[in-house]
């Protein structure tokens, strides 16, 4: 491989100006895309020029967002009902999206769940299977299927949304933490398998004030975050910069990476 020559200032400026719509010409599929972090990512990608397939179990919620987002951005935005843990549904879902938008070249595995349980010895097999299905089995199936299609089509990007629970697990979230730790491992494995044409990265997300935050004990949360560098939880819109970077053209040399976005929570004592 020859060493590339340095760009002139004019060339660098022209390249920077060219990323005002960094997702132009891309087709993105976002699971769990009708609410929370997935909704913010879907909105940001469409605003940045991508056509977007919004996927969640509740197709009506996807349809509402798709209509509003298409009207606001002028992009093609489609709605698809699917349970991400349904192994056999994934290929047909990808076929649906391809028929309407073209080959998916940006996959965002955002759908997740972290149910509450009384104690570890009271975790049922059904709950365990559900947590693993949504947070690990589903993303594996999507990456395996979509990644192979991306390679055949010339390349793409896959982005997983993990959690700081995978780094600092507690008894209150252990099944979820284990699943997300597995997702971190899949990130590196799929980056190896589908590179160099497909990049695979993960955002390790801290606590964000999505709709699920309504059930949080805020007194406990305030004590927890008091010693964090940012001393707070994140606004869902604050995931957008990392997602656009990792899926955009300026991250061409970034793959197999876990990028933590947590207000410094994992840096705190």
Image: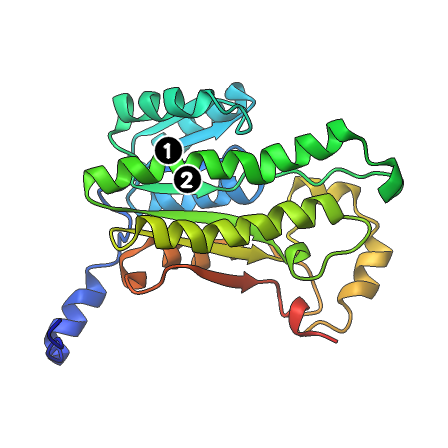
Horizontal side of 157 relative to 168 (left or right) equals left
- From the viewer's perspective, is residue 174 above or below residue 125? below
Structural crowding at the residue carrying mark 1, measured as other residues with C-alpha within 10 Å and reported as few (<14), some (14–19) or many (≥20): some
Residue 48 lies, in percent from the top left, at 32, 48
Structural crowding at the residue carrying mark 2, measured as other residues with C-alpha within 10 Å and reported as few (<14), some (14–19) or many (≥20): many
Q: Are marks 1 and 2 in contact (CB under 8 Å)?
A: yes
Q: Residue at x 75, y 37 (%)?
A: 115
Residue 35 appears anywhere in the view? no
Looking at the picture, the colour scheme in use is rainbow
Question: Residue under circle 2?
Answer: 143
Residue 163 appears anywhere in the view? yes
Residue 25 lies, in percent from the top left, at 22, 42
C-alpha separation, residue under disc 1 versus residue under disc 2: 6 Å
84 or 137: nearer the eye? Answer: 137
Q: Residue at x 46, y 20 (%)?
A: 88
Question: Residue under circle 1?
Answer: 145
- From the viewer's perspective, is residue 102 above or below residue 220? above
- From the viewer's perspective, is residue 1 above or below residue 124? below
- From the viewer's perspective, is residue 25 above or below residue 202? above
Task: Say what secondary structure mark 2 lies in.
Answer: helix
């Amino acid at each position: 491989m020859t060493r590339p020559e340095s760009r002139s200032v004019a060339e660098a400026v022209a390249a920077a100006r060219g990323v005002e719509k960094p997702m132009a010409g891309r087709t993105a599929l976002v699971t769990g895309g009708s609410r929370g972090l997935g909704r913010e990512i879907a909105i940001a990608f469409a605003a940045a020029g991508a056509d977007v397939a919004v996927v969640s179990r509740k197709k009506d919620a996807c349809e509402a967002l798709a209509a509003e987002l298409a009207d606001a951005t002028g992009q093609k935005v489609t709605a698809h009902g699917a349970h991400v843990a349904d192994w056999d549904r994934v290929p047909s879902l990808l076929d649906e999206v391809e028929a309407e938008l073209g080959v998916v070249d940006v996959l965002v595995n955002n759908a997740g769940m972290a149910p509450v349980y009384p104690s570890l010895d009271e975790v049922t097999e059904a709950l365990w299977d559900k947590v693993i299905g949504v947070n690990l089995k589903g993303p594996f199936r999507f990456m395996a299927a979509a990644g192979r299609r991306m390679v055949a089509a010339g390349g793409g990007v896959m982005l997983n949304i993990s959690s700081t629970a995978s780094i600092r697990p507690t008894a209150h979230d252990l099944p979820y933490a284990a699943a997300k730790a597995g997702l971190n491992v899949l990130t590196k494995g799929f980056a190896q398998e589908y590179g160099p044409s497909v990049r695979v990265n993960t955002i390790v997300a801290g606590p964000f004030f999505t709709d699920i935050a309504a059930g949080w004990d805020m007194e406990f949360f305030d004590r927890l975050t008091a010693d964090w560098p940012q001393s707070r939880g994140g606004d869902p819109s604050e995931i957008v910069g990392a997602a656009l970077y990792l899926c955009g053209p300026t991250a061409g040399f970034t793959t197999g990476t876990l990028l933590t976005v947590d207000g410094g929570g994992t840096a705190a004592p």
